[in-house]
Amino acid sequence: MRIEIVAFDGVDEMDVMGPFEVWGSAARQGHLEVVMVGLDGPAEIKGMNGLEFRATEGLAAAGTPDAVFVPGGGWLSKAEKGAWAEVQRGELPARLAELAPDLSWIGSVCTGAMILAAAGLTKGRPSTTNRQAWQALRDTGADVKENRVVDDGNLVTAGGITSGIDLALWIVEREIGPDLATRIATAMEYQPHRDIWHR
């Protein structure tokens, strides 16, 4: 399974790095592939707290991935860079809407869900986001669940910031198995939150 994490300027660093740590560990053990991608190709990214890092490829540049994961950041403050800005610009939501039908799943953490909403992917569907954006997500027509992780099959969303780690561990458990998820959590000295809504 190839998972592409979409990175953009103004992204919340933990939204990206927490899931990347989990999936990177699974990748090192040969279970999946995780790649940081930019919308338009390789990109130098500056996160909302100033961390600079690199997206090494473009979104779906190597062919349609199995999954795409969208972080948030900058939505609540309507920052000039971040999730709010990406929704206003419109290019990322449009690309995600185009890709989604061919993915095994698409996911988000925190206000990355608002980007998925702008792509029309959460309307009428169980999903979640940062608790401070629950109403904004409801206003788009989503069936907001106030859980840490919401798994609706090919749409998997997580609440605020650190819940991305729980989503990533849940995906490892769902797609590969609970033993690997437990080993990764133990190695990270992380106690998973089992507040998961799923069908």
Image: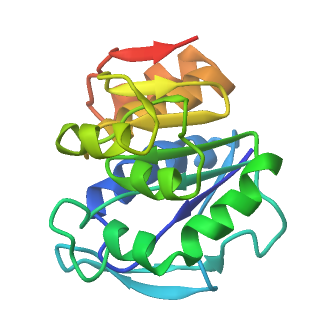
Between residue 57 and residue 96, name the one nearer to us.
96
Q: Quadrant of residue 59?
A: bottom right
Which picture quadrant has residue 61?
bottom right
Q: Is residue 38 above or below residue 33?
A: below
Q: Which image quarter holds the N terminus?
A: top right
Taking depth in this image into account, of 123 and 29 the one nearest to the observer is: 123
Query: Residue 26: where, in percent of width, then height?
Result: 58, 40
Front-lying residue, 112 or 63: 112
Give the quarter of the figure containing the C terminus. top right
Tell me residue 170's x, y (percent): 50, 26
Q: Residue at x 62, y 21 (%)?
A: 174
| 25 lies left or right of 139 | right
- In the image, what residue occupies the spot 75% across and 39% down? 104
Q: Position of residue 132 (x, y in %)?
A: 17, 43
Q: Is residue 133 left or right of residue 70?
A: left
Of residues 32 and 38, the one nearer the viewer is 38
Residue 38 in sight in this render: no
Residue located at (26% from left, 31% from top): 189
Residue plotted at (46% across, 38% down):
141
Residue 175 at least partly seen: yes
Question: x, y percentage for residue 198?
Answer: 52, 15
